[in-house]
Image (tube, rainbow, N blue to C red):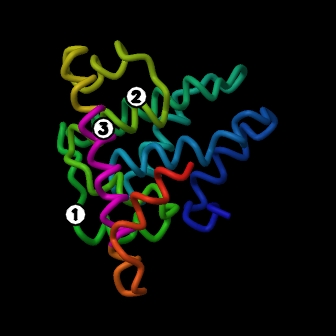
């Protein structure tokens, strides 16, 4: 499914480690985390490769790959997590619709949300990687969640309006569950 987005280099290197099933299972998770952090398919593949190269070939560990890729994703960008428009459009095509709005988040909130919520890293690791204290990390992660909820509400409302569905029906749906 996603292999069409990878160059031969990433596939070749991942195939070398393919005897470890968890590496094959992790390629999508690692790549999509990098894509959300960098906002660029090209940069995501580069940092995914960089993370892959850091693995011990005798004992490849998918968690190490994920962590090293996260580190490379943030270091290579020098703190600038804002993708270029063309890169953002390309990334949006690759991503599932539910994840596209993550790329619309402000840079710091996006990094916090992706690392803490989607990748599931410990708060201390995320804060250290993003050069934030734990309170700043928590605040930015919460801001991201609220922004994503607002994006989602606006998208639902935008879709409903042209179809003649009243705005108040959204509230009714929420209260009926």
SS label for mark 2? helix
Q: Which residue is mark 1?
A: 84
| Cα separation between marks 1 and 2 | 24 Å
**Is 145 placed left or right of 26 in the picture?**
left
In the displayed structure, 136 sits above or below 141; it is above
Mark number, residue 111: 3
Q: Residue at x 39, y 58 (%)?
A: 171
What segment is highlighted magenta in the picture? 142-157
The quadrant of the image that shows the N terminus is bottom right
Q: Residue at x 41, y 79 (%)?
A: 165
| Cα separation between marks 3 and 2 | 8 Å
Q: Which residue is mark 2?
A: 116
Q: Quadrant of residue 42?
A: bottom left
Q: Nearer the viewer, residue 114 or 76?
A: 114
Q: Give coordinates of residue 69: x percent, y percent.
A: 45, 35
Q: Give coordinates of residue 74: x percent, y percent.
A: 30, 36
| Cα separation between marks 1 and 3 | 16 Å
Q: Nearer the viewer, residue 53 or 77?
A: 77
Q: In the image, is residue 159 part of the stretch drawn in magenta?
A: no
Looking at the rendered image, the disc whose residue lies closer to the viewer, 1 or 3, is 3
């Amino acid at each position: 499914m996603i292999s069409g987005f990878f160059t031969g280099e990433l596939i070749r290197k991942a195939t070398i480690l393919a005897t470890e099933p968890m590496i094959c299972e992790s390629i999508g998770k690692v790549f999509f985390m990098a894509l959300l952090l960098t906002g660029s398919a090209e940069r995501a593949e580069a940092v995914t490769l960089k993370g892959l190269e850091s693995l011990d070939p005798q004992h490849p560990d998918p968690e190490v790959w994920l962590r090293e890729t996260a580190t490379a994703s943030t270091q290579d960008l020098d703190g600038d997590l804002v993708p270029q428009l063309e890169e953002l459009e390309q990334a949006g095509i690759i991503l599932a619709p539910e994840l596209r709005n993550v790329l619309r988040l402000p840079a710091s909130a996006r990094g916090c949300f992706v690392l803490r919520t989607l990748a599931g890293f410990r708060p201390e690791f995320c804060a250290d990687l993003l050069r934030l204290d734990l309170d700043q990390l928590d605040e930015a992660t919460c801001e991201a969640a609220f922004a994503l909820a607002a994006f989602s509400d606006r998208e639902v409302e935008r879709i409903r309006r042209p179809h003649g569905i009243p705005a108040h029906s959204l509230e009714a749906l929420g209260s009926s569950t």
